[in-house]
Amino acid sequence: MISSEPIITVGIIERLPSLRGEFHGAFLVDGKTPCSGSYEAVATPAGISLKCAGKEIVPAATMIRCLPDGESTFTVFDVVIGINFHWERKENQTFQGALRLVQRADGTISVINEVALEKYLASVISSEMSATAPMELLEAHAITSRSWLAAMLDREQAEKNVGVPSQRCIEKEGEIVRWYDREDHDLFDVCADDHCQRYQGISKIISANAAAAIQATRGVFLVYDNKICDARFYKSCGGLTELFENSWEDTHVPYIECVSDAPQQYPPIETEEEAQRWIRSNPDAYCNTNDGNILRMVLPSFDQETTDFYRWTVKYKREELEEILAKKSGIDFGTVMNLVPIQRGPSGRIFRLRIEGTKKTIIVGKELEIRRWLSRSHLYSGAFVVDADRDEKGVPITFTLRGAGWGHGAGLCQIGAAVMAVKGFKPEQIVKHYFPGAEVKKLY
């Protein structure tokens, strides 16, 4: 297991023809050329050209590394955040650590930040949580995020050792199963967006509470069976948490079980009838809150644009859904007649869905791929039931999806954890609630 703080690489933004930004303080470019002030990088056929304060520093290179002198920082202009989500936008973002520019095989530029793990985590906690979040929540999230990151680095190293990446897409006649993980990144450890962990450097003020939470939990991890836990998190479970294997590879993770997100125990969902009753109801749960004070503590401003996360409704005209499916899947289903859940997890999330059309019928999985196919951005979760209004011939006019929760549901429920913190639960109690059987250990 890990015994000292590592340096990690974070992909800030990818596949750019050019970028601009600013060095705040002195940087050393490729170990020899001092640079400060504004900078501009442009992808050319010969390599990346870097100008600093209008002067060309590097004429052409496939990789440029800019190291800070002391506490100098750098800004990258127009970083896209919330990629493919309904709140996607651009921000100027500022970072600690080193800046690395890499030219990809297609000629574009990837922007990478090299940063110490604990500084990275301080930003993640501030990016994922409001500065006013309770210390108990910030510490619980710090332990969770730190554990996920270390487990991911271990998995990455194991794949490098065997030289074979894990399989993440299985296609056979009539079925497509696909899942996503950080292994989709080839030039860096993690990306800066929700695909991995939301990271915005020091663009958002790192609150005194967030800094204190990182310091209080420095080197503290969730551990199970003498291994660091692959501790996942998301916004809202919808009342019941989900199994790891229903969103990612077919490996049961013993500390990511179905947990009732409430003081009382709700049984896991086992039948379609139970899923229908559960999702159409409004059971009490830690994450079933519309308390604005709590939500403001948990959610950054753009996440607060989502208010119906616990139970939600999305309605499509049939033609609109057919257009979305064709664009997202690349498949012409013809007239979509039915959306049929084939398998659900214990939280009610569908991980195998049959889409029946007049031209094509396909079973799609896993949970995130279903969400991707059925929305222009992403459905809030895969826990949904389907109502279809039909004409006199039985052809659907509209499809209404009624759903529960926000995110994949496996691991820590951020909104539920926030409510637990407000209710007086300690950080260790919170993480052990969502990761049953795991222990909390300080490793450096």
Image (cartoon, rainbow, N blue to C red):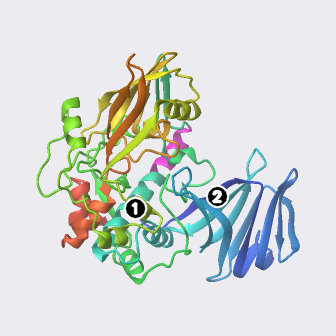
Residue 411 in picture, x, y percent from top left: 31, 52
User: Where residue 80 appears, x then y in whole percent?
Assistant: 61, 59
Question: What residue lies at 79% left-to-right and 79% top-to-bottom?
Answer: 34
Residue 342 picture quarter: top left
Residue 65 visible to an observer of this rendering = yes
Q: What stretch is highlighted in magenta?
A: 154-163
Q: For the residues labelled 1 and 2, say whether their Cβ atoms are less than 8 Å apart.
A: no
Image vertical order of residue 57 relative to residue 368, above or below? below
Residue 294 found in image quarter: bottom left
Q: Does the magenta stretch include residue 410?
A: no
User: 420 and 238: which one is in front?
Assistant: 238
Residue named by callout 1? 145
Judge by depth and name the residue closer to the eye, 112 or 387. Answer: 387
Say which quadrant the C terminus sits in. bottom left
Left or right of residue 322, residue 114 in this image: right
Magenta part, dominant SS: helix
Residue 134 x %, y %: 30, 75
In the rendered image, which quarter is residue 184 located in?
Answer: top right
Query: What secondary structure is found at the residue carrying circle 2?
Result: strand
The label on residue 331 is none
- Depth check, mark 1 against mark 2: the one in front is 2
Residue ranking furthest to the front: 392
Q: What amino acid type is highlighted by mark number 2?
A: Ile
Q: Nearer the viewer, residue 134 or 327?
A: 327
For the residues labelled 1 and 2, the Cα–Cα distance comes to 21 Å
Residue to which mark 2 is pinned: 13
Query: Which quadrant: the N terminus?
Result: bottom left
